Amino acid sequence: MGRREEKFDVIVIGGGPSGMMCAGRAAELGAHVLVLEKNSDLGNKLKKTGGGRCNITNADFDKESFLSNFPKAKRYLYSPYSKFSVSDTFDFFESRGLPLVTEARNRVFPQTQRAQDVFDVLEDYMKEGGVAIRKNVRIASVEKKAGKITSVTDERGQQYYADNFVIATGGLAAPDTGSTGDGMLFLKKLKHTVGEPNPNLVPLKTDTKWIHNLSGITWSFMKIRFVQNGKTQVRKTGKILFTHFGISGPLIINSAYEVKQLLRKGSVEAVIDLFPDTEEKMLDKKMIKLLEKNKDKKMKNVLPDLLFKNIALEILALPNLKMTEAYAKDISREQRKEIVHTLKNLTFPISGTCGMEKAIVADGGVALDEVDFKKMRSRKYDNLYLLGDVLNVNRPSGGFSLQLCWTTGYVAGSDIGMQERRA
Ligand SMILES: Cc1cc2nc3c(=O)[nH]c(=O)nc-3n(C[C@H](O)[C@H](O)[C@H](O)COP(=O)(O)OP(=O)(O)OC[C@H]3O[C@@H](n4cnc5c(N)ncnc54)[C@H](O)[C@@H]3O)c2cc1C
């Protein structure tokens, strides 16, 4: 049979987590499935998730509580979630030989701590069902006729035919992984409403040099406030990671959306309390003792007793302190209080959010009321399915994005597979 005539029950565009889950499920139910992936490998983004460990879901088994993490999309997600929930994710991976472990904040990882192992489970799932996979195929257009998708065409002009089509091409975050927003363009051309993409879960930038100098340091417990016009607008407590461009870590990434809204209105300052569990007075008492014990030492050798040396040195060099070379015995009461106050109120301006390159998730995607969530099918084309990051669903970090992929992929795959069974 010539390639022109080759026809599948379903073509999945995009071999990310949602596309692979969908392909595997449809094939399990007997569908003839083809996955088209533009990269030379599937799942490039998946393999990077959770710093290579893959935060696969979030172990909140209460439906209401879990879905409250998707404030705007919650009402749409009840139906698909009732078909494939967090406990189904546990069953799916554990029954395929990948035990999962739950860490702080309900974040779930494979026990092996390897995202590659999550990928391997999905690859085996697809193999078992006989899914055909073509790599290095970038779909360039989607053709339609009379309310149906008829074919897709790659950039070399090769056309692919199927009864059903799945757009699982991801969003625009981290485009180096292959997610360059092609699906959004197809959907716009198909007259779907697609929101403007913006980096959403993303680290924050500052132009403050001394913060850049702290790059690589993780401070495991601090309080951060984002202040505008002297008023605290956002307040979070937890871990922070300093980077060569600013600040990062789950807590910061999850604040980015609100900070971005504030930045639209004016300037924003971050204020970090490095010792949120210790009142300023108590910290001052600690400092008095520290200075007395180390009278004859220079401050650059004294302050590192309280915090990482790099942070201590950057703080001592700040313009309001300038005490790096001062001896502890020479520190006045006012100077001591100023050090303590600075440790509780490290202040620097936020210049913006990092771009798509460093984003985990981007805003935008297809409008949710244009999707039938019982099947994950377009309401405009009854043989077109939309999954994962292609949907306009805001959510925090912590495994919620991948759960969205497992849920939407499974539901679409089931619907497609059941059609083939009935046929
Ligand atoms: C650094 C990083 C860490 C993350 N960590 C986590 C985490 O720990 N937990 C979590 O829940 N979420 C995490 N996320 C988010 C999560 O990875 C995404 O939400 C998820 O990968 C989306 O899956 P998807 O299937 O919708 O699309 P994607 O994973 O983006 O996959 C889309 C696929 O489609 C292919 N494609 C695109 N256009 C075309 C085309 N025209 N033709 C053919 N193929 C095409 C792409 O090459 C890609 O392989 C992380 C994201 C990043 C960037």
Image (cartoon, rainbow, N blue to C red):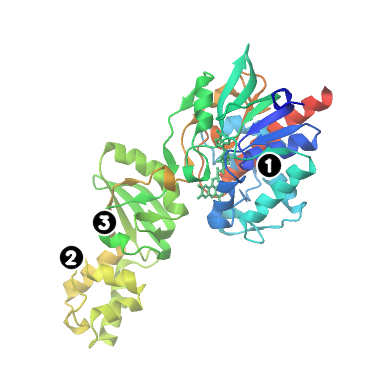
Separation of marks 3 and 2 at Cα, in angstroms: 15 Å
Mark 3 belongs to which amino acid?
A: Thr
First in sequence: mark 1 or mark 2?
A: 1
Residue 242 sits in quarter = bottom left
Identify the mark at residue 85; answer none if there is no mark. Answer: 1
Mark 2 belongs to which amino acid?
A: Asn
The structure residue drawn at horizontal position 59% and vertical position 26%, both measured from the top left corner, is: 153
First in sequence: mark 3 or mark 2?
A: 3
CB of residue at label 3: within 8 Å of ligand 1?
Answer: no
Mark 1 belongs to which amino acid?
A: Ser
First in sequence: mark 3 or mark 1?
A: 1
Residue that badge 3 annotates = 208
- Secondary structure of the residue carrying numbered label 3: loop
Residue that badge 2 annotates = 320
Q: Position of residue 258 (x, y in %)?
A: 39, 42
Identify the mark at residue 11; answer none if there is no mark. Answer: none
Residue 325 vs 263, above or below: the answer is: below
Q: Nearer the viewer, mark 3 or mark 2?
A: 3
Between residue 21 and residue 325, name the one nearer to us: 21
Residue 260 in sight from this viewpoint: yes
